[in-house]
Each structure stands twice: as C-alpha cells, then as structure tokens.
Amino acid sequence: MDSLKQSFSAMSEMFHTRMNEFQHELQKNSSSKIAATTSSIAADFEAFKNFIIATLNTLQHQVEFLRTELDRQEMRRRRKMLLLHGIPEMKTENFNSRVVSVFAEHLDLPNFSSSSIKTTYHLGRSPTKKPRPVVVKFTDVVVRKQVWYAKTKLKGTGITQSEYLTKPRHDLFLEARKRFGVTNCWTRDGYVYIISPDGVRHQVECRGDLELIPVASRSAVENGSPALSPGTVVKSPETRLPISRTRRAVKK
C-alpha cells in the first residue's frame, strides 16, 4: 500500500513538471499570427491539466482511505493482544505458565488463570542481549483490559507492557512524541492520544489526523518540551508507550 501511494505521488510530481514545461514552451512560441490557435490550445491544456490533477487527488485519497481501513482491521485483530517486555528467556520453559505466574504475582487479578491466555509467542529472532518482547493473546477483551489497566503494579519489576500497535500506528506514535513531547502522548485501545500545546486532548489514528493538530513553537519542539499556554492544566496521560518498539521505559 505504501509503494502504491509513493507511485501516485511520483506520477503526480512528474505530471506537474511536464505540464509546467509544456505551458512555458506554449507561451514562448506564441505569436500574433497564431494567437487564436494558441488561445484555444491553452484553454484545452488548462482543462486537461485540471482534470488530471483532480483525478490524481481522488486516487490518492482512495489509497489513503484503503490503507486506513486495512490498518483498522489489523488493529481489531489485535484487540485481545498486549506486548510484554523484559521477561528473560529460557530455552526450555512453558511460556504460557511463565506469563501467568508474572501476572498472578504482580497484578493481583483474582480471577486470572492459565485459561485466560489463548497463546503467547516471541517477536523477532533469537535474542543476543535483550529478551524479545512477548505477544500475549487473551481469550477475552475484558481480561485484556484488566491486565492493561493494572500495568502500574509492574513498576520496579523490570517488566513492562505496551499495546501491540501496527507499524503505521507505531510510526504515528513516534512522530507524535517527537512533535508534542513524550509526556503529552500515549495510546489506548490502538489509538494515539495527544495533548496539544493549547491543552486540548486529541485522538488520532493516521498521519492526516496528526497534521491537523497545531504544534508548539520551533524552539520548544527542539528542546523536547512543547510549551503550553499560560495557566493550562494538563492531566497525566493514562498510558504511555516507549520510543523503542520493543522496549518501553518505566517512569520513575
């Protein structure tokens, strides 16, 4: 989908360049003897140019719409999943039981058991230094939410949770943190939430949504701390994710 969008962008850029060159030559070669003919050609050219531009814009919007819908479907497929970071790996172990014991020991969930987890598996290849993140798929969305909202109890254990975002949403989240600051961005249920410089909370799921949010001054962004308007009170985000895809820092 990304390659298709890039192809449309390249085609659009090439079209604008060629049409501008043709228009320049048309104006340069016009004379009083063929003024009427030139005028007719110029009108036809302008109509054709507008038609092509409108067509390319429509195609680009359709591609963006399809990509967003595919991303939404993938996030729905992951609605019962979470990522666990920081669990040391062992060659021989029942990892489901290992995850259950971590939750039972730290999260204080009375009704949680091995039957609450459908499957677990590692992401990526065998580790070298860092343990790989673990995808945990729960049997029910309600159980997943109970585990997610109890994540603060993992503080100090070296184990953290994050949502299993798709790559476009993960990249969107990283870009949001870059623009608005780490403490002003978090995720919940697959959506990225942002506190903008005016103190307003925004929910975004694609780059177009992000572009509509006004950013802080350039100096504030470069310092990594977007400036809020005087007197603005910003509530602490409910959940935060790391800059790295496979690790998330625990706030001390």
Image (cartoon, grey):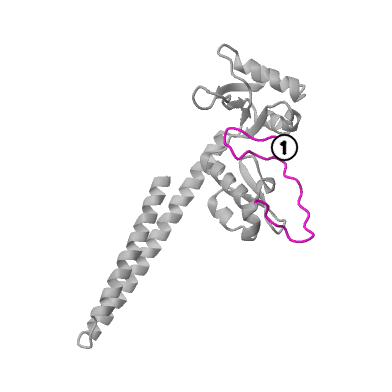
Q: Is residue 209 left or right of residue 145?
A: left
Q: Residues within 10 Å of mark 1 (few under 14, many from 20)?
A: few
Q: Quadrant of residue 18?
A: bottom left
- Please provide percent x and percent y for residue 28: 26, 79
The residue under label 1 is: 251
Question: At x 33% / y 69%, what residue is drawn?
Answer: 20
- Most extreme residue toward the left is 33
Magenta range: 224-252
Above-or-below relation of 174 to 29: above
Q: Residue at x 75, y 36 (%)?
A: 252
Q: Position of residue 38 (x, y in %)?
A: 25, 80
Element at label 1: loop
For the residue marked with disc 1, what is the amino acid? Lys
Q: Is residue 245 left or right of residue 251?
A: left
Q: Is residue 214 above or below residue 48?
A: above
**Furthest-top residue in view?**
92
